[in-house]
Image (cartoon, rainbow, N blue to C red):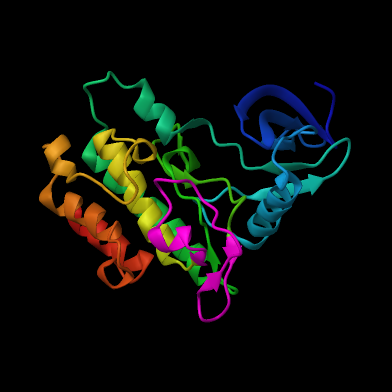
């Protein structure tokens, strides 16, 4: 592929509805980056808006479990250059397991703790931000086994009171919180989303294939899970806000206790 800005694409490493991601080389300093390029013929009407939203969000954030934005531009088409994460997303890792196997629960707990740390940075940023689309495909696991939070297309800046109402709900069905379906967004949608993600990764039951807001007790499917870890997952998935963890930091503390 021809050069994009100062970047030379080397190989395609990802493909989404609105963009393609390449391993690329910065021709000025030979640094390897992840180069995300907007599809010129995307069928998603809001593709450009989502793409620019991710640029805005990454430019504001600085956390070791969130990719750094190095550069962005529009020639020959919109692109952004970010930290290259050598690894796979957690949904792909789950799919690669033999059908009767589960991911190790201690590994899932550690990923959960790391993502809680990234979300805490997002939620306490000024202005605060909600990620809004937590799911297994948005947890990248690097070659060292550490989890990264990626794809800020749908992230939302929140007002000081921490809650906004959207004209139309966005997110991924099965992972999106009940109130998110009603267009209400707060940091607690990410608590729910992480709970749904950990439930999926620990049980292999895809919430997109199940009745909305219905999750089987994790230990009924994967008895190797501890009662404590299963309890954290189900508390994060509470339908009522007052029954959920009051913050992502509270969820992180509960996950740490599971270790």
Q: Position of residue 39 (x, y in %)?
A: 75, 33
**Residue 102 appears in view:** yes
**Residue 222 appears in view:** no
Outermost residue toward the right in this view: 76
Q: Residue at x 43, y 53 (%)?
A: 176
Q: Residue at x 23, y 24 (%)?
A: 101
Q: Is residue 175 magenta?
A: yes
For the record, the magenta segment spans 156-184
Q: Is residue 51 magenta?
A: no
Outermost residue toward the top in this view: 98
Q: In this image, 17 relative to 204: left or right?
A: right
Q: Quadrant of residue 9?
A: top right
Q: Residue at x 49, y 30 (%)?
A: 87
**In terms of secondary structure, what is the magenta stretch mainly?**
loop
Q: Position of residue 63 (x, y in %)?
A: 53, 57
Q: Position of residue 211 (x, y in %)?
A: 32, 43
């Amino acid at each position: 592929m021809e050069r994009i800005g100062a970047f030379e694409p080397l190989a395609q490493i990802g493909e989404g509805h609105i963009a393609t991601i390449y391993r690329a080389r910065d021709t000025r300093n030979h640094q390897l980056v992840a180069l995300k390029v907007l599809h010129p013929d995307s069928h998603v009407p809001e593709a450009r808006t989502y793409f620019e939203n991710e640029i805005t969000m990454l430019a504001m954030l600085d956390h070791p479990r969130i990719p750094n934005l190095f550069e962005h531009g529009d020639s020959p088409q919109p692109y952004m250059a970010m930290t290259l994460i050598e690894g796979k997303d957690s949904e792909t890792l789950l799919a690669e397991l033999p059908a009767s196997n589960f991911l190790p629960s201690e590994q899932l707990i550690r990923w959960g703790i790391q993502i809680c740390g990234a979300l805490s940075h997002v939620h306490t940023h000024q202005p605060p931000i909600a990620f809004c689309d937590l799911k297994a495909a948005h947890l990248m696991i690097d070659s060292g086994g550490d989890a990264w939070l990626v794809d800020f297309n749908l992230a939302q800046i929140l007002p000081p009171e921490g809650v906004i109402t959207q004209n139309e709900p966005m997110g991924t069905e099965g992972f999106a919180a009940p109130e998110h379906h009603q267009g209400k967004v707060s940091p607690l949608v990410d608590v729910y989303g992480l709970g749904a993600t950990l439930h999926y990764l620990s049980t292999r039951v895809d919430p997109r294939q199940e009745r909305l807001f219905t999750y089987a007790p994790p230990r009924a499917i994967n008895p190797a899970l501890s009662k404590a870890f299963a309890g954290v997952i189900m508390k994060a998935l509470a339908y009522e806000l007052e029954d959920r963890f009051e913050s992502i930091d509270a969820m992180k503390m509960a996950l740490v206790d599971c270790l």
